Amino acid sequence: MTTKPQTANLFGNEWARDINMFLANPTSFISKSSKTTDLLIDDMLMIISTSSTILSLKLAILHVFLNVELFQTSKSYLTKIVTALEYLSSQFVEQKDNLFLHQLLAALTTLSIELDERFLHDSIQLTKCVDLLLIQANQVADGTRSERVLVRSAACICLSELEEVYPGILYSKLSYLFQYCQLEKTFIRQYYLSLFCTVLRHSLLKFKSIEFEEQANSLQFFFSPTTVLIPFIPPKNFREESAHLLCSSVDCVMSPNLEKVDLKKSFSTLLDASTNMTHTMLANTMHKLSDCVLLAGTHPSILKILYHRYIHSSSIVLLQLVYSLKAKFGRELFDIAEESSFERSIFWALNNPHNLNPHTLLLYTWLIHFPILDPITHREDNRVPNGLPLFQLCYPTPFDSIDLTVRCFHLFSASELILEEPRSINTHLSVLVQRVKSQPGSYATAAFFHTLYLFLHRSHPALMIQSIRVILTDLYLSYPMLAPYLINFMLVITSIVPANNFAIPMLSYIVKHLQTLRQVRTADLMFHLQLVEYAALTPKFNLDSLLVLLHSVLQPEVLEEGDWHLGHTILDVCRALLLGIHSDSQFQRACALLYRIRAKYTDVDVCNEAGFLLILITSVSTKKYRPLLSKASETNAEPSLKDLVVGTTFQLTAPITHIPEVILQLEKMPNKTSSSSTAYSNPPTVTRDPTEILKQYLTATDQLIDTSFQLNFNLSYAPHAKPSTSMQTIYAISLHLSDNPHYHPTASITIPKLVYKAPSENDKRNVSFEFRPKLPFPAQFSVSAIFSLQDGATYQTPLAHLEVSFSDLVLPIPLPQEISEQDTPALFEALWSHLSRKCFSEKNTESKCTESFIKLNKPSESVTRILLHTLSPNIVTSSDNLIQLLLYIPPRHHILMKARVSPDSTDVSILTDEWRLLSYFNQYMHTLLAQM
Amino acid sequence: MSIRGVWVILDYSDHPPSVLYSRRYPNIERRALKYSSKPFPHFPVPSDKDMCNAVMQEVGSVRENDLSQTTIRSCDKNWSKPVYELFEGRLWPVVLIQQKNIYFVTLPLSQHKLSEERPIPIEIPSIPVALELLISMAQILSNSPEKIKVDGPFLSSLHQFLSISVPMGTILETNVNTYSSYVPVLTEQTLPSQLPDLPSWKPVVFKGNPKLTLKIAEKVQLTQWDLTRSTTFWNTYGTVQCKTELEGVPEITLNLVIPQGGFGLRTIHTHPSVHMFDAQASTPDPEETNSITLQGPLMLAHTTSSTKIRFSPPLGWFTVCEYSCSERNLPVHSDFAPIKAYYEMKGTHKLEFYIHLKLDERVRNNFEYLEITIPLFNRGPIQTADIRPASMQVSISSDQRRLIWNVDKKFPKNLEQTLQATVTFPEDPGESVPGEDPLCTGLTAYILINFRILDFTISGIVIEPRSVVSFPQSKYKLVINRELSSAEYKIWNVNGDTVIPQLAQ
């Protein structure tokens, strides 16, 4: 186990809420907790290993381990968790919570697989996990001791899962598993049976690679253990073999002459035990058993009992099992009468009033595809049992929801009976029509149009086109808001029914009717115009009638009202018309229309657009203006301000293009701006007593609002970059730094322009980033740049990571105004004493203060030179044999050093109020000394 | 039969949709990746936010009664509830069900790698199991308050259910009763030192006062629109349920009897573990199917018929069989109705309506409750209501859109009840409130009859008390109940339109 964490109070009393917050955003939770991820994991492991922790919290933490991606993408985190869970699992005797143990084994298995798959690939962890599970599963020999029951069932479940992920991995344990199936008598027997069946299936699949002559030996191996149970040794190349077995098809792999008595006995064991299984496990196991029967080449009559038991089951899971048997074995297992009986059973089942709605819908979905997939317009209906009309069984009832009604019609539309009575489609659809009328534009409307589509798609369309046209025309004229549905319908059925058979006659009638209308509401007019636009785009539609209609629409009150949306909709229709007009008279009438809009429409925007169109068509040939207008007409977007200004004929700006190569660089300037911006809300009073100085200083630092520092860089093209001509000058370069949990977000910087020249003469721009740390630790930021080119295209490219090193964090102590530099030594001593007291106080267990000591075996001159050169702003006092330094690490931490210099070595005492800084400081010192 | 993940999404009207609970199964995801093939590349399990948005886009585009939808659902798009496809078809199959404002979503594992075409739903065994799982989850949350708390007990129950039933992605159990039986075993810290041989669907034995409760719960569905033309559709169906509180694993045998005068059972479906055979037979045929379907037209039974049933029940309530009085489970078009009703309404802002009820003399005249709900939707709140006769117990609902008539528990000697009323509404009806049926506009209206009668069924089916035998024999208290209650019992206004499919005669 890992070192003891600082505190086990990771989640408060509202732990459930905290855990949900953690799951929602782990990174944010970690940063707010001021802990590293490692410590967090330690805390959580401590919580689950403490016996007094409540069960639900333990389970919640296991859930966190399984569902937080952050833990699983790091090898160290995952290894730590798996190791701890493995240890806990092995101490199961001490675990009192059976449910926790059950979940612990599941979590261990899942994470062991993750660890192996992502990082290790050496199967050591997997082997340990399997050993642990096999030991538990083997306890069946002890009888029915209850404390083992649940652990054993969990072990079986976990082993099944392992076998599913790595098919064939437990091949060598098959004989043991079969023995357990026969020995286990409690209610968990179904898990042993399921495990055995899974392993048997995969073991039989392996027979594909075994020669017939060798198969007898392999089969004998199944039922006679020749290997010890543990330690578990996975098969050689089990990963490759597993991948191969996953793809293997299930067909007979065994020699017909092979003696299969024991194999059949195992099949019988499974079947006999099936009545004591729950439905779910039964279906699970029997699916695999049927595969085993197929693989073994055994006659499937052994499975007939399943047909008899479950053909009339009310459980859709078991009905699906019967279907799968039918699909696998066909006439070998079912004769024609039995197949018909099963189909009838599904019909009965879907009319079972006890079914929940989702069950019934699923059964209908099955029936639609059962037993063949082809449209059954001209099929021979030999699958329907004699005397059983489909009609009555799949007709909507008064109690059916809209979804069920649609499904019923889906089946009915494929029934041959609809061919006998095509004229009564109005009658059939009346239930949906009534719903549409009561609420046009609703779910029922979508259902209605879908049903119409089904009728046309699955039956003889010619016989019902007339009826459908009448229904739709009546509906539309009463409810113009159905225009979008109608347009969609006409578009979709174009492949089934040619436009001149359906769309054109219907639209012609509607247009003619609209011409007779005196007054139309604006809302309805908008819908009518949508339909008119569609008509204008329909090939071979009579455009004259549309031109007449448009002229009649442009009544004086409409022009005077000047509705912006209406105006643009009219212009959309005009554009559509202009694409199709082919005679002079039509052209003249179109021009007159546009002129009228231009002259009389009160909305300026519409006027301008109409004027633009008029100029376009009168100045440019048809051949040239049609491509422009067709692009505009193809867009379905609502008229926007942008369209108003530039029209829809200009290409929209492309989205940001990502350049994966690094073409820019940020070079850190050697002399950082070490000014720290500090803000004191209440300046301290001036005193000279060291205690008072310390008090002033501590009061001032406590009141610090903000501490930040700046790092300067030069932005230029990367030395190796070879930008294309267009990229040699880039504009509006915006530099973004990624977020870091230890720092406040850093503001982005924008540079107006950067030019590429020869590498030695490259344009360089000075940029400064301001960093505000939350914690005193170095960090790495990823950097990206977004810039634009002259043509307006925008690009995004990554830069090399930006490092904020420990040396960047070292700042001179921020003295408040009232403390002069002469007081610094006194402050140093007082601070040293203060931190020492905190460090060694027995009462203060929360203190992060610590003292350290290092001995540098370097000549005194070298040490003195390095310290004086690199840390001169931090030197407090300097004499021949003692140098005192005070390093300030933002946001408000300190490292105090006393370096006692002697000729051959230097003893350095270090005191800090953040022990985690020591490792960084140590590394920093070694780097400095290495430069000597 | 495994799932890649499961989500519970809330969609309250005053809050953006959000994921209340989610769980992923990395092992199953790993298998899904291995099963993917070129025609159907692997689409990884989306984040909670993406899944929520995709589900809302799919279901929101065809929200019931949503007049504000801006996206038109193309007429050729598949209607394949409860199996959906999301992310433009790249994520399939997705099983989704809805309960009030909660969506339950799961991704079953599809193991068809070699096929060049997408498999059809019936070929994927994970789909029905996943559907059962979601229904069980909905059942667990069905008693939750309107707004489920993230840290509340209901979510904790759901988490525990999934931890036991789907610990690693493979669905082990979907039946809530069976799962409830496991919970004491899992949470009990001390168990008996020796456990008896028990089937998996009965992991613990009962301890306590022995009792056997049998219940026949029958429902009647009816819709009627014009009494004079005898246009009534009805369906009667029911269940025989058993709750066994006996020690050990007893086997129960009983006789179901349909006496003379009953409507007769047309279809019976029994639980797969139930054996059913003719009561006259001396020994049952073990190969006999568990369903009897009686052919022929609907007719009253002229002789008593008896069916013997034998079964080994699990703990908790267990449905022994389901039956229907109508042929092939379909509603029947006939004159019979337990309560014949006539509803006539006319008017606009001032409505006058008349309701006449007549109890069929074959129905027991003793109701546990009988309530008529008169929805008056899409007219605004009720301003005044003048009821005749004034002694009738009629109240206005809290949303002021319905009248509720509490009819006496017994009809008078002539077996008829009548109500007349005049109701006024404001000139401007205002906005619709949630729950108003958009169908009810103008004179298109209906009333709903809700009732329950104890100790009575339309089918006449009874259980012979003396035929109930348990093996091994033991003493216990036997309780047999019967009840008939209304399911959807709707009477349409004779002056208005109806929304009823027209059967081809």
Image: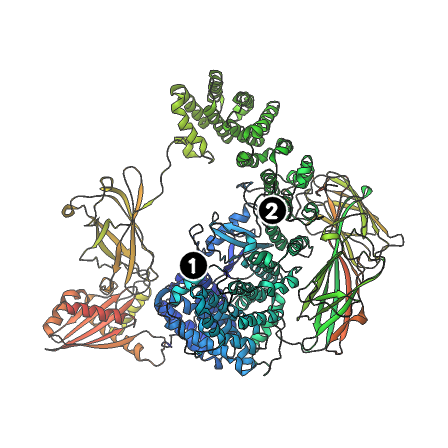
Q: Position of residue A44 (x, y in %)?
A: 42, 71
Q: Residue at x 45, y 60 (%)?
A: A248
CB contact under 8 Å: marks 2 and 1? no
- Residue sitting nearer the eye, A304 or A44: A304
Secondary element type, mark 2? loop
Q: Which amino acid does label 2 sit on?
A: Glu
Q: Report crowding for label 1: few under 14, some 14 to 19, many 20 or more residues within 10 A (C-alpha).
A: some
- Residue sitting nearer the eye, A256 or A517: A256
Q: Which residue is drawn at 58% across and 75% down?
A: B185
Q: Report crowding for label 2: few under 14, some 14 to 19, many 20 or more residues within 10 A (C-alpha).
A: few
Q: What residue type is labelled 1?
A: Lys
Q: In this view, does A436 lie to the left or right of B298?
A: left
Whether discs 2 and 1 lie on one chain: the answer is yes
Q: Where is residue A419 in the image (x, y as percent from the top left)?
A: 66, 38
Q: Is residue A55 left or right of residue A845?
A: right
Residue assigned mark 2: B64
Question: Residue under mark 1: which chain is it in?
Answer: B
Q: Is residue B340 left or right of residue B376?
A: right
Tell me the quarter of the image containing the N terminus of chain A.
bottom left
Secondary element type, mark 1? helix
**Which of the two discs, 2 and 1, sits closer to the camera?**
1
Q: Is residue A693 visible?
A: no
Residue assigned mark 1: B34
Q: Where is residue A924 in the image (x, y as percent from the top left)?
A: 21, 68
